Image (cartoon, rainbow, N blue to C red):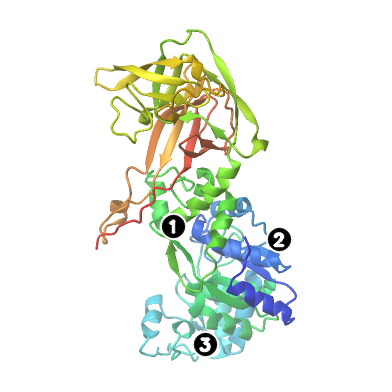
């Protein structure tokens, strides 16, 4: 898809005016959780702008808060971005710059633009004021430069306990922008860091570290989501007063919000820890690892992101919009196979007992490169339980019922004559007869069947586990319902189905199950049992979710 949005125009004009020779962008995740579909907009936007405008794209971990961060998340983020196809040119860590960040902070202290404060977080919050009332100066705001230098050095050297002192920028406690009211830029935090180990006892705050990281790396356009718009004056203030040579431009865009999906790290962690999902990569989650396991093609995600454009404001998008791009992509690329999700056996009474016929079937109607396969047909076959009713309910019923005749695709006409039921009254077999004159491809035109249904041969097949996924959240719930009350207990349904015997797919292979949907081979598959995840049905059954007021 052609990439054309307001940020693209800004970058193009900057290059035309010779302000920049190229676009240098970055994606700066904090390694405290797994990436989700909402992050895909930021990743793809930063990556595509760098590639389109002749520059390079950095992956930088904003690892300035060791209490919440973990190397597990570092590895997962790298894995997800690589899978998405947004390959970074450089890999950086904010922690690589801790020494320079400390020196730049000390520069502010020496210029009288930062001071060490003894107030607690609560006291600082109280003195900050409100949107209608200006803040009040800390009693420590007027400490001398010499005293602040010594105190900041002592913070670095471990003289004080966590929370005992902080370093604050000295800006304007009466500013209309709350972020400019002497923000905290360093705090004491004794915690093991995944990269720097135990070297540092003080860590920079995000609003101080982030602009420095961008400036150090020579980022030309710092693209971020809309919630950072009010932070932009502080971003520019830090770059200017720490005397950074490079001056990046921060530009904000609307976040990608997916309606009725679980994205909050706290909620996902709760689902994982309480075993309500199969891990961070559960196919019901819209984490990138979950989407990958579900079989969502990365190309469909790119097309989805670009099709939405890049708005300056925020708005919700339905997940079904992504699924439509998935269908469009897989409809052209996924080979077709016969699979039965809920098997019902047909016994063809007048077919020879030990005979097996084979018919050559293309693996895709249009994509000849996907080849063909030989499909068997014998006295016993499986059809979908939903393709049979004892009595034809109405004229529109175009499948099998007693006394009716249908074509088994690529085989023969069969007519249902009787059923066998178990002790509970459930049908376990349908006895039929076939017409040998109606073989597919024979040119038979004597009569029309009551529909066409697919099958899997009942003597040559494999048993499989088929997982059907629905949204993790219920379609309807009370407005003030707790998270636990919103969770859909029927979001996963497991079926025991059958597929063609000759299928020997690998984990991650995708298929179209005839008349059913698109499926992917799950990592839980073994040599004995293949496990398939439904990616999406063939057609959307989407209805806008209702909410009770």
Which one is in front in this view, the residue at disc 3 or the one at disc 1? 1
- In the image, farthest residue toward the top: 353
Q: Report the residue marked by disc 1.
A: 265
In the rendered view, does 469 fall on the left or right side of 64? left
Where residue 544 sits: x, y (%)?
Answer: 35, 56
On the question of residue 523 being in view, the answer is no
Residue 245 appears in which quarter of the rendering?
Answer: bottom right
Mark on residue 170?
A: 3
Camera-side residue of 368 and 261: 368
Where residue 204 sits: x, y (%)?
Answer: 55, 72
Mark on residue 89?
A: 2
In the rendered view, does 208 fall on the left or right side of 453? right
Residue depicted at 57% across the width and 24% down the height? 441
Image quarter (top left, top right, bottom left or bottom right) of the C terminus: bottom left
- In the image, farthest residue toward the front: 446
Mark on residue 77?
A: none
Can you say whether 204 is above or below 173 in the image? above
């Amino acid at each position: 898809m052609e990439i054309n949005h307001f940020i693209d125009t800004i970058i193009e004009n900057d290059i035309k005016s010779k302000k920049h020779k190229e676009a240098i962008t970055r994606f700066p995740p904090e390694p405290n959780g797994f990436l989700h579909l909402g992050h895909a907009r930021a990743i793809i936007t930063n990556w595509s702008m760098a590639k389109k405008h002749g520059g390079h794209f950095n992956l930088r971990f904003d690892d300035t808060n060791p209490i919440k961060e973990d190397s597990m998340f570092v590895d997962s983020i790298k894995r997800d971005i690589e899978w998405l196809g947004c390959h970074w040119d450089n890999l950086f860590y904010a922690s690589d710059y801790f020494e320079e960040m400390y020196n730049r902070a000390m520069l502010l202290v020496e210029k009288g633009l930062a001071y060490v404060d003894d107030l607690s977080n609560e006291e600082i919050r109280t003195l900050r004021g409100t949107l209608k009332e200006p803040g009040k100066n800390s009693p420590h705001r007027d400490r001398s430069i010499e005293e602040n230098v010594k105190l900041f050095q002592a913070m670095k050297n471990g003289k004080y306990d966590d929370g005992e002192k902080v370093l604050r920028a000295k800006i304007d406690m009466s500013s209309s922008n709350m972020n400019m009211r002497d923000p905290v830029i360093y705090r004491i935090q004794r915690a093991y860091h995944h990269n720097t180990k135990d070297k540092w006892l003080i860590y920079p705050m995000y609003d101080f570290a982030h602009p420095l990281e961008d400036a150090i790396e020579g980022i030309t356009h710092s693209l971020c989501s809309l919630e950072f718009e009010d932070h932009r004056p502080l971003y520019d203030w830090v770059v200017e007063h720490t005397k950074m040579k490079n001056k990046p431009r921060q530009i904000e865009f609307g976040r990608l919000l997916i309606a009725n999906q679980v994205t909050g790290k706290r909620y996902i962690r709760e689902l994982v820890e309480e075993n309500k999902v199969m891990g961070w990569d559960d196919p019901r989650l819209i984490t990138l690892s979950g989407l990958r396991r579900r079989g969502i093609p990365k190309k469909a995600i790119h097309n989805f992101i670009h099709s939405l454009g890049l708005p300056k404001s925020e708005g919700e998008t339905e997940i079904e919009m992504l699924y439509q791009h998935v269908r469009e992509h897989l409809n052209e690329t996924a080979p077709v196979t016969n699979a039965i999700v809920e098997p019902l056996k047909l016994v063809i009474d007048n077919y020879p007992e030990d005979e097996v016929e084979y018919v050559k079937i293309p693996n895709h109607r249009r994509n000849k490169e996907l080849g063909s396969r030989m499909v068997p047909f014998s006295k016993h076959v499986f059809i979908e339980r939903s393709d049979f009713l004892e009595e034809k309910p109405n004229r529109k019923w175009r499948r099998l019922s007693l006394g009716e005749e249908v074509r088994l695709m690529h085989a023969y006409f069969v007519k249902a004559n009787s059923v066998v039921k178990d002790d509970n009254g459930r049908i376990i077999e349908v006895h039929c007869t076939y017409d040998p004159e109606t073989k597919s491809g024979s040119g038979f035109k004597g009569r029309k069947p009551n529909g066409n249904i697919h099958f899997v041969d009942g003597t040559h097949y494999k048993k499989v586990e088929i997982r059907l996924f629905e949204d993790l959240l219920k379609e309807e719930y009370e407005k003030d319902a707790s998270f636990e009350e919103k969770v859909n207990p029927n979001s996963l349904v497991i079926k025991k189905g059958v597929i063609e015997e000759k299928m020997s797919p690998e984990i991650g292979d995708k298929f179209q199950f005839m008349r059913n949907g698109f499926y992917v081979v799950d990592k839980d598959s073994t040599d004995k049992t293949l496990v398939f995840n439904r990616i999406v049905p063939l057609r959307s059954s989407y209805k806008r979710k209702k909410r009770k007021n």
